[in-house]
Image (spheres, rainbow, N blue to C red):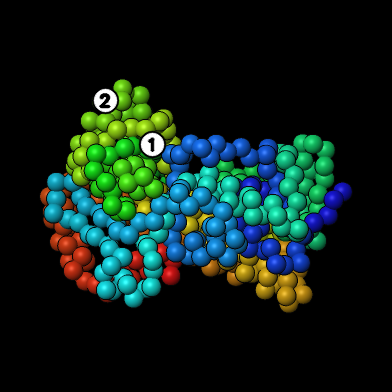
Amino acid sequence: MKSTDIIIIGGGMVGLALAGLLKNTACQLTIIEKAPPQWDLSQISNRVSAINARSEQMLNEIGAFEKIQLERRSPYQKMFVWEKDSFANIEFDNHDPAIQQLGLDQLGFILENQQIQHALWQTVSEQPNVAFIYATPQSLGISDNGVFLTLDNGEMLSAKLLVGADGANSWVRNQTKIPLTSRDYQHTALVCNVKTAEPHQQTARQIFAPDSILAFLPLPDPHQCSIVWSLPPEQAVGLSKINEQAFNQALTVAFDNRLGLCEVQGERAIYPLTARYARDFAQNRVALIGDAAHTIHPLAGLGVNLGFADAICLANEIKRIHQQGQDIGEYRHLRAFERQRKAEAVKVLTAMEALKQLFSGDFPLKKLLRGVGLSATNQLPFVKKWLIEQAVGI
């Protein structure tokens, strides 16, 4: 039986980030992933994330940000949000005096998930305290003193702490029988890359309609965006199957023709949207981070940032516990991590639900209130500054 300090199940962005944050500790880490990752970095992926300032800082601290290809980094300077057939809108500009006080070079970066994961993998693979095992976990035993993991390749591992960073359908969460609260958003996300007739001008745009939310996220090419279109499931399926000309026309109309004619580039993919929240983010010898602990609506692009914040918090707690000579796997030492991250997840889940409900439906009075509220907010610099602080993780 091999012994290590921490086993991380899941070699995705969040699991790798945790390992990277623990690079200068005495902890020995073992990352379990089903198979060696494969990327086609020559192709621009349609799965992207809006990385905020806190996540960028973390990637720089790990040494991963510099490994992301410069020509594939897409900073955005502005955000514009509006409601279809309404005067309701709000704009965030990095050059606004109130926002300039934050000292940000940009509001964030749009980065391909595969670029982030590849950069993290390269960085973490160079750490002397990290070992990778490519196998599938089979069984889990937990005692007062440690965890015991059996893999499908016959290997057995023991550790002080097991971290579940294995996604929304977490094996770790299921094995530990942690209850999950979930809510079907009754929406499906359609994602793809599109070419636009007019340049995006490094601006992230989002339009709310009574039954949909459509985001255009700027890519490095000034005429290319990644879209996330949140729709009722039957509409999303239909739009994923119609011919390209019909799709281009529907998308251009849905986006109020803001960037001229849109032309789909590559495949269109769809993903059901569900809010999830684990009852426990930690138990004795176990911690959950990222989608294993929570999933949210993608309308604000906060998902991976929330997961990275989990990794930052857990890494800080592990360092603190280790420096004090305490057992990193005991639940009493993990409670501070759990309290902080559960509170943050609840806040974000509640905010996303409130935002979605606010813009749902086209009842005239509700629409008027939305217009007045957003327009008033747009004229209040201190409110916009606070909103940006929340969005960028400051």
User: Can you give x and y, in whole percent of width and height, for residue 305 in the image?
Assistant: 48, 57
For image coordinates 58% across by 51% down, the residue present is 119
Amino acid type assigned to the residue bearing label 2 in the image: Gln
Residue receiving disc 1:
192
Q: Amino acid at mark 1?
A: Cys
**Quarter of the view holding residue 263:** top left
Secondary structure of the residue carrying tag 1 is strand
Decide: is 343 above or below 154. below
User: Hey, which residue is sitting farthest top in the picture?
Assistant: 243
Please say if 234 is above or below 378: above
Residue 39 in percent (x, y) is at 57, 38
Quadrant containing the C terminus is bottom left
Instruction: Work out how far the residue at label 1 is from the one at label 2, CA to CA, in angstroms.
Output: 15 Å
Query: Based on the displayed image, in which of its 4 quarters is residue 270 positioned?
Result: top left
Answer with left or right where residue 382 lies relative to residue 130. Answer: left
Residue identified by numbered label 2: 245
Whether 247 is drawn above or below 388: the answer is above
Q: Is residue 1 visible?
A: yes
Q: Secondary structure at mark 2?
A: helix
Judge left or right: residue 55 versus residue 36.
left
Give the residue displayed 73% in from the left and 77% down from the top.
324
Residue lying at 73% horizontally and 39% vertically, measured from the top left:
135
Which residue is more in the foreground, 94 or 29? 94
Q: Position of residue 168 (x, y in %)?
A: 54, 45
- Residue 23: give its label: none
Q: Considering only order in the chain, which callout, 2 or 1, is on the residue closer to the N terminus?
A: 1
Question: Quick one: label 1, few (<14), some, or many (20+) residues within 10 Å?
Answer: many
Residue 292, can we see it? no
**Picture coordinates of residue 320, whole percent (x, y):** 67, 73
**37 left or right of 84?**
right
Q: Residue at x 49, y 61 (%)?
A: 56
